[in-house]
Image (spheres, rainbow, N blue to C red):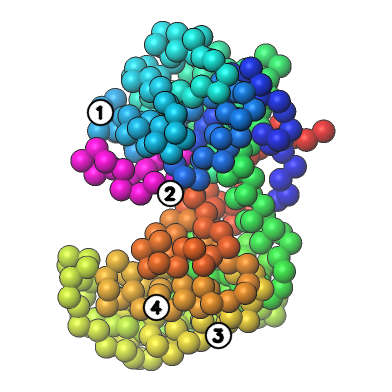
């Protein structure tokens, strides 16, 4: 998917009220932000609009907000962090209605280069548009606050929410621009080029727990890549589909036929499909997850019936690393084992290390693989780490993302 969308470089924000949908869904502990990655990722777009003389109105969701508006899921800590990073006051509108009189008055009083942050968009139940038109009133209220709209929330771009895509209808009606920010542009350029126009050889690495989560990704990537590597819990369904004993390992029994189809498709397309040749096994899943665990390594077709596979083994680590090192483009989504446990993180570390040492364009598809790269210290060695787990997966499936689709096309 080429990004033929209007960006913030394609319109002049001077003197304009610009609503920017960011992804400030940051982890909080006792009211303090524990990882500022998403805030840092939003800064280039915000700084550009400030420099252009725009009046910058930021909005985002935070958390799932299952029990209504509450201070634990307020965006107040984000306003504080943004103020420090931008070196200027970011006015926070604490009003739970998000677009009420407090927001209207604050926007009316803005000067060029000012920044305000609205309250958590999910404090308005209409944000999550189910059915599709439920969020039109909230979207219309958001549009009334601004002249132009910028979506820079790749992590939310796969959701057709009021503040992500529905708002564009109302901004466009009043003659405003609907553009994407620098983060969105970067995400789509990296992921889009990797999938649609990769420098070959193109290797895709998929891990994580369930085949069901990645059915369409496997199918789509098989057609696009030269080598598909499957590790993590999902590999055991493929191994069982080949008739191997997998013991107590994770398995999507309903997807065995699908795995057989994919194995056949690989042969027909003449692609390489690499599965684990040896496996780290234990008597059961560690409890707690990072607690001590007794691990042995066996060939992947010799897992005892009373044991559970929890990581790829050393032979597989070498096999996968060597395949990654031959690539010119690598996309990786999903860990190779229970990476939260130091004993069971070896497979994920081996893959991350191989990617860090290659000259290939390396794209990490958000979620657990991004967390693993950050935790293991390999983040700065990757070409691009996606800020959106679910969004990057849907992108790799070949789906159109509502947050991207809603932006103006470049004439």
Residue denoted by label 1: 71
Residue 282 tag number: none
Residue 25 belongs to magenta span:
yes
Q: Which residues are magenta?
A: 23-38
- Give the alpha-carbon distance from disc 1 to disc 2, as whole Å: 22 Å
Residue denoted by label 2: 37
Closer to us: 206 or 189 = 189
N-terminal-most mark, 4 or 3: 3
- Give the alpha-carbon distance from disc 2 to disc 3, as whole Å: 30 Å
Closer to us: 236 or 3 = 3
Provide residue 208's location: percent of width, then percent of height. 41, 65
Which marked residue is nearer to the observer: mark 1 or mark 4? 1
Provide residue 299's location: percent of width, then percent of height. 38, 91
Identify whether 242 is placed above or below 111: below
- Residue 344, by quadrant, is bottom left
N-terminal-most mark, 1 or 4: 1
Residue 322 tag number: 3
N-terminal-most mark, 3 or 1: 1
């Amino acid at each position: 998917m080429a990004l033929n969308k209007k960006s913030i470089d394609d319109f002049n924000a001077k003197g304009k009220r610009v609503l920017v949908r960011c992804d400030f869904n940051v982890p909080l502990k006792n009211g303090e932000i524990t990882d500022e990655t998403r805030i840092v990722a939003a800064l280039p777009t915000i700084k550009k609009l400030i420099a252009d003389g725009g009046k910058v109105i930021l909005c985002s969701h935070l958390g799932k907000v299952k029990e209504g508006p509450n201070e634990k899921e307020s965006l107040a800590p984000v306003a504080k962090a943004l103020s420090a990073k931008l070196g200027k006051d970011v006015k926070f509108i604490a009003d739970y209605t998000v677009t009420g009189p407090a927001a209207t008055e604050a926007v009316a009083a803005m000067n060029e280069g000012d920044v305000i942050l609205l309250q958590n968009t999910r404090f308005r139940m209409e944000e999550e548009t189910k059915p599709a038109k439920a969020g039109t009133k909230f979207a219309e209220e958001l549009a009334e606050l601004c002249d132009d709209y910028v979506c820079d929330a790749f992590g939310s771009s796969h959701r057709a929410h009021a503040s992500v895509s529905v708002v564009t209808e109302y901004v466009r009606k009043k003659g405003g621009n609907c553009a994407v920010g620098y983060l969105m542009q970067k995400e789509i350029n990296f992921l889009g080029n990797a999938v649609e126009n990769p420098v070959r050889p193109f290797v895709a690495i998929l891990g994580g727990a369930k085949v069901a989560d990645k059915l369409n990704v496997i199918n789509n990537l098989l057609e696009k890549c030269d080598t598909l590597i499957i590790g993590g819990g999902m590999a055991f369904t493929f191994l069982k589909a080949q008739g191997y004993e997998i013991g107590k390992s994770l398995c999507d029994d309903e997807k065995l036929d699908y795995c057989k189809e994919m194995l056949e498709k690989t042969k027909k397309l003449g692609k390489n499909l690499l599965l684990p040749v040896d496996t780290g096994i234990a008597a059961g899943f560690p409890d707690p997850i990072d607690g001590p665990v007794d691990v042995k390594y066996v060939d992947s077709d010799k897992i005892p019936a009373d044991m559970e596979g929890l990581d790829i083994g050393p032979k597989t680590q070498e096999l996968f690393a060597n395949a990654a090192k031959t690539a010119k483009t690598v996309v990786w989504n999903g860990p190779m084992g229970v990476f939260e446990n130091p004993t069971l993180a070896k497979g994920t570390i081996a893959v991350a290390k191989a990617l860090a040492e290659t000259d290939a364009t390396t794209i990490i598809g958000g979620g657990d693989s991004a967390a693993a790269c950050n935790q293991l210290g390999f983040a700065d060695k990757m070409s691009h780490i996606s800020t959106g787990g679910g969004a990057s997966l849907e992108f790799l499936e070949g789906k159109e993302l509502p947050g991207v689709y809603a932006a103006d096309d470049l004439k």
